[in-house]
Image (cartoon, rainbow, N blue to C red):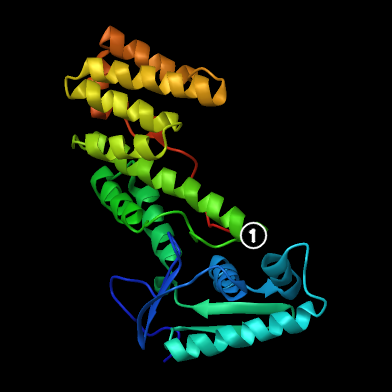
């Protein structure tokens, strides 16, 4: 099997947006648990199709306490992972280069790349075609099953990727909600779920307030603001940002723009553009 062979039209071979799961050839699925082998696979997946130096791999696997024969130990772990990939008939291979190793595969076999692809589509279309952008953002958010690489004790590279992926998940959720609102669709359930999952994320709170106001539930919108303010003060020792406070004031004044998705536009709620997980 070559690395370009398709395994499934819907489920990628390597799923990392939650516990790491491998689905390929001779197995239904296998859950990768925390161990040197699990961390090694996770690092390769973070940097899929890009070389990683041996020094980086040693640091990711053993941190500040590497074995005395770290290079040999790394070689053993890479060899074991190669054997597992072959036994699984996974559409991926580990290449050895002058400076280290690289895990090669087609992008569709990694859920991170599938997620980023849908997010790029949503980014590109958010202003010109919000309906298609909302659909792409919905597909992106549906790929998530939990914390990236859940259950694995990662090194610096892995932790950075986990944090960046979580940021991009927030962006996808924001894009889905705001484009749905621009299209006039009910986004209350999604926004309530987002606020429950990320209670300190003020943009989710802000969008939920507006969605409730549009649904004729001004009192509930005010309650959402007061609850969010209490959380911010208690957990962060900070008042809501001027942007969130201004939205509360606009709701109290019944500002007309709150009812008009066209005049509200998409731009005000969009975070920074989508980027690769690792630069």
| Residue 93 percent location from the top left of the image | 53, 84
Q: For the residue carrying disc 1, how many other residues have a C-alpha within 10 Å: few (<14), some (14-19), or many (20+)?
A: some
Secondary structure of the residue carrying numbered label 1 = helix
- Spot the residue most to the right: 68
| Residue 200 percent location from the top left of the image | 46, 31
- Spot the residue most to the top: 253
Which quadrant of the figure has residue 59?
bottom right
- 234 left or right, relative to 57: left
If the image is split into quadrants, where does the C terminus sit?
A: bottom right
If the image is split into quadrants, where does the N terminus sit?
A: bottom left
Examine the rendering and report whether any part of residue 218 can be seen: yes
Examine the rendering and report whether any part of residue 274 can be seen: no
Q: Residue at x 77, y 80 (%)?
A: 71
Total tally of numbered discs in the picture: 1
Q: Residue at x 39, y 64 (%)?
A: 114
- 164 left or right, relative to 229: right
Q: Residue at x 48, y 90 (%)?
A: 86
Q: Residue at x 38, y 47 (%)?
A: 172
| Residue 24 percent location from the top left of the image | 38, 82
Say which of 36 and 219 sits in front: 36
Above or below — where is 97 with respect to 264?
A: below
Which quadrant of the figure has residue 260?
top left
| Residue 88 percent location from the top left of the image | 43, 87
- 172 left or right, relative to 78: left
Above or below — where is 272 with respect to 49?
A: above
Q: Which residue is mark 1?
A: 157
Above or below — where is 267 with respect to 219?
A: below
């Amino acid at each position: 099997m070559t690395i370009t062979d398709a395994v499934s039209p819907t489920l990628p071979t390597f799923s990392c947006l939650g516990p790491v799961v491998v689905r390929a050839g001779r197995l239904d699925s296998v859950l990768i648990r925390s161990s040197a082998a699990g961390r090694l696979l996770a690092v390769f997946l973070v940097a899929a199709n890009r070389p990683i130096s041996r020094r980086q791999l040693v640091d990711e696997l053993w941190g500040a306490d590497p074995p005395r024969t770290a290079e040999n130990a790394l070689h053993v772990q890479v060899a074991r992972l190669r054997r597992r990939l072959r036994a699984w008939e996974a559409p991926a291979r580990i290449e050895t280069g002058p400076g280290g190793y690289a895990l090669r595969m087609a992008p569709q076999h990694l859920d991170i790349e599938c997620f980023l692809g849908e997010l790029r589509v949503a980014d590109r279309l958010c202003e010109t075609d919000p309906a298609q952008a909302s659909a792409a953002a919905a597909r992106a958010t549906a790929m998530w099953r939990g914390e990236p690489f859940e259950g694995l004790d990662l090194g610096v590279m892995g932790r950075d990727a986990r944090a960046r992926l979580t940021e991009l998940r927030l962006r996808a959720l924001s894009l889905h909600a705001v484009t749905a609102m621009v299209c006039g669709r009910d986004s209350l359930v999604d926004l309530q779920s987002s606020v429950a999952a990320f209670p300190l994320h003020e943009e989710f709170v802000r969008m939920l307030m507006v969605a409730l106001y549009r649904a004729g539930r001004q009192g509930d919108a005010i309650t959402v603001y007061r609850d969010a303010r209490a959380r911010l003060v208690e957990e962060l020792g900070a008042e809501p940002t001027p942007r969130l406070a201004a939205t509360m004031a606009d709701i109290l004044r019944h500002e007309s723009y709150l009812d008009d998705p066209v005049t509200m536009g998409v731009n005000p709620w969009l975070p920074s553009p989508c980027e690769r997980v690792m630069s």
